[in-house]
Image (tube, rainbow, N blue to C red):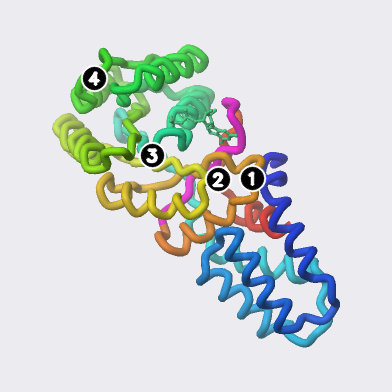
Amino acid sequence: SEGLKRSSDNLSNSIGAIFTKKRLDEDTLLDLEDTLIAADLGIDTATSIVEALRAEKVDKDVAPDEVRAILAREVENVLGPVATPLVIDQTKKPFVILMVGVNGSGKTTTIGKLSAKYRAEGKSVLLAAGDTFRAAAVEQLQVWGERTGVEVLTRPTGADASGLAFDAVQKGQDEGTDIVIIDTAGRLQNRTELMDELEKIIRVIKKRDPDAPHATLLTLDATTGQNALNQVEIFGQKAGVTGLVMTKLDGTARGGILVAIARKFGLPIHFIGVGEAVEDLEPFAAGEFARAISG
Ligand code: GDP
């Protein structure tokens, strides 16, 4: 995609700048390792890519394109196993998706995009505005609801989010809704409180459906680089994250963080966000992404 292409410009330019000499020597390899680390790929991945290049090409003539091809191959090796679609099990009525992530990571936008996608597939969708403390978040979700023709359940500001989540699952069961998506708060100022709230939401919706949530998706802003790793750590333990959505992969050079996250956590990456518009959500394709960040 265009968005993805833009995101890759920087790393690819850096690689071009390093490989000004024809012969692949140790200095060039070390420069490449630094570049890969600076691009957020993580030390392990950077090292293994450089090892692969050293084994295959050191002291040989090598064109930048060959290096990019090896880089793409190594990145795809890491990302391939985690690039898995989100499977909506339609024996679950409703299939309950819990959305978690810090404020600003693109949670609400992703919910809007998912609503549009599933509506277009002919599925019925119900949204729960579970970030009950931020009036703006509730309003924003309502805007997405109107835009995509999807009902949004709300409660007054400050109301208990778990009660709202319970109601949404119940309503979905009563009405035979295909998918219920529950938004949640994402303030990290009081992490303990936030995690308690998430645990309570999960506990309470299990009273309506012991298997719910059927998917817990964490949105991560790819432009925050290494911070994203901490967020997977925090939400992963407490909220039982089952899959990731990487947002804002348009117009940034920081897509390398996906590689570090994949390597460290092995969690499925279901979707990537490549813009603010409703159509700017793509299934995560490892090969395409690997080629895009390699130039
Ligand atoms: P939330 O606080 O986690 O619900 O985050 P929002 O959904 O409100 O998103 C925060 C900001 O990021 C908004 O201005 C969105 O339009 C923007 N945003 C979300 N996803 C993307 C994306 O994939 N690309 C870009 N460029 N912006 C995005």
Q: Is mark 3 within 8 Å of ligand 1?
A: yes
Kind of residue sitting beneath label 3: Gly
**Label 3, label 2: how far apart the Cα atoms are:** 14 Å
Kind of residue sitting beneath label 2: Thr
Mark 2 surroundings within 10 Å by alpha-carbon count, few (fewer than 14), some (14 through 19), many (20 or more):
many
Kind of residue sitting beneath label 1: Thr
The magenta stretch is 267-278
Q: Which residue is mark 2?
A: 223
Q: Which residue is mark 3?
A: 101
Mark 4 surroundings within 10 Å by alpha-carbon count, few (fewer than 14), some (14 through 19), many (20 or more):
few
Give the number of callouts: 4
Is 287 left or right of 166, judged from the image as shown? right
Which callout, 1 or 4, points at the residue further toward the start of the chain? 4
Which callout, 3 or 4, points at the residue further toward the start of the chain? 3
- Element type at mark 3: loop
Residue 277 part of the magenta segment: yes
Q: x, y percentage for residue 112? A: 48, 25
Q: Tell us which disc is closer to us: 3 or 4.
A: 4
Is 274 left or right of 219, judged from the image as shown? right
- Element type at mark 4: loop
153 lies above or below 233 = above
The numbered mark at residue 158 is: 4
Residue extending furthest front? Answer: 189
Residue drawn at point x = 39 percent, y = 53 percent:
230
Kind of residue sitting beneath label 4: Gly
- Element type at mark 2: helix
Q: Quadrant of residue 102?
A: top left
Which callout, 4 or 2, points at the residue further toward the start of the chain? 4
Residue extending furthest bottom? Answer: 59
The numbered mark at residue 252 is: 1
Which quadrant would the N terminus be assigned to in this image?
A: top right
